[in-house]
Amino acid sequence: MKSSLRLAFCLTGALLASGSLSAQDLKFGLQGTLAYPTSDLGDQDLLDNSLGYGLGAHLVIGFTGGHAVVPRLDYTTFEKNHRKVQTLQLGADYNYFFSQQVNKGAYLGAGLGFGLAKFEVDLPGMSADDTPNAPYGSVSAGCMFTPNLGAELRYVYTKYEPELFGAKPEITSPTLNATFIYRF
């Protein structure tokens, strides 16, 4: 786990270092997210499709022609009937703006990263928790209404294997996220 986290930090640092050499535009940003769990994560026995919420931070490294690299950190939490799942994801997205100007108009994106999760289940007379980690992939579509305000739909796919009550189930945790973006 520690070596994977170091690798994620090194890759993000390399992206930041290489991006700043030829970047045209740098903008920091924050995001607020509503997340809908699907597949195993949203199953009736775990979160029963309960909405989660999250916060995050990102850096937009803009290049000419509407290309951008976006290192990001996302925290999301879900809770339902004594079951709680929290995720912390570190990764980077590639965004392409159709206007060919970064932070202007509609864009599509794809990303990769590394996620840490904490699964907690408290049932009468017993409880279990585990903190598995796994890589993730994402695709997104969004629009920057102004250079500072935007919205994004993002699909994130991860597969965790938490050890709960002596079993180690494979929990696919795709989420569909609706995000409000503020950049400064």
Image: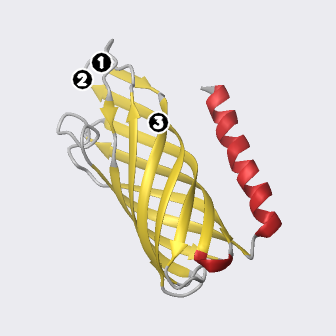
Query: Residue extending furthest top?
Result: 166
The residue positioned 41% from the left and 69% from the top of the image is 141
Vertical position of residue 155 compared to residue 10: above or below: below
Residue 14 x %, y %: 75, 49
Total marks in image: 3
The amino acid sitting under disc 2 is: Pro
* Mark 3: secondary structure: strand
Residue closest to the eye, 27 or 44: 27
Instruction: Identify the residue under disc 3.
Output: 117
Q: Determine the secondary structure under disc 2.
A: loop
Quadrant for the N terminus in the image: top right
Residue 49: percent from the left, percent from the top?
Answer: 22, 49
Asked if residue 113 lies left or right of residue 26, the reply is left
Q: Give the SS element for disc 1.
A: strand
Comparing marks 3 and 1, which lies closer to the viewer? Answer: 3
> Could you tell whether 4 is left or right of 117 in the image?
right
Nearest the eye: 23 or 103:
23
- Residue at coordinates 34% horizontally, 18% vertically from top-left? 168
- Find the distance from the CA under tag 1 to the CA under tag 2: 6 Å
Return the residue at label 1: 126
In whole angstroms, how far apart are the C-alphas of marks 2 and 3? 23 Å
Find out whether the residues at labels 1 and 2 contact each other: C-beta distance under 8 Å.
yes
Which amino acid lies under the numbered mark 1 shown in the image of this protein?
A: Met
Q: Position of residue 113 (x, y in %)?
A: 55, 45
Which disc is residue 124 wearing?
Answer: 2
Q: Is residue 32 above or below residue 97?
A: above
Cβ atoms at labels 3 and 1 below 8 Å apart: no
Which of the 4 image quarters holds residue 161?
A: top left
Mark 3 nearby-residue class (10 Å; few <14, some 14–19, many ≥20): many
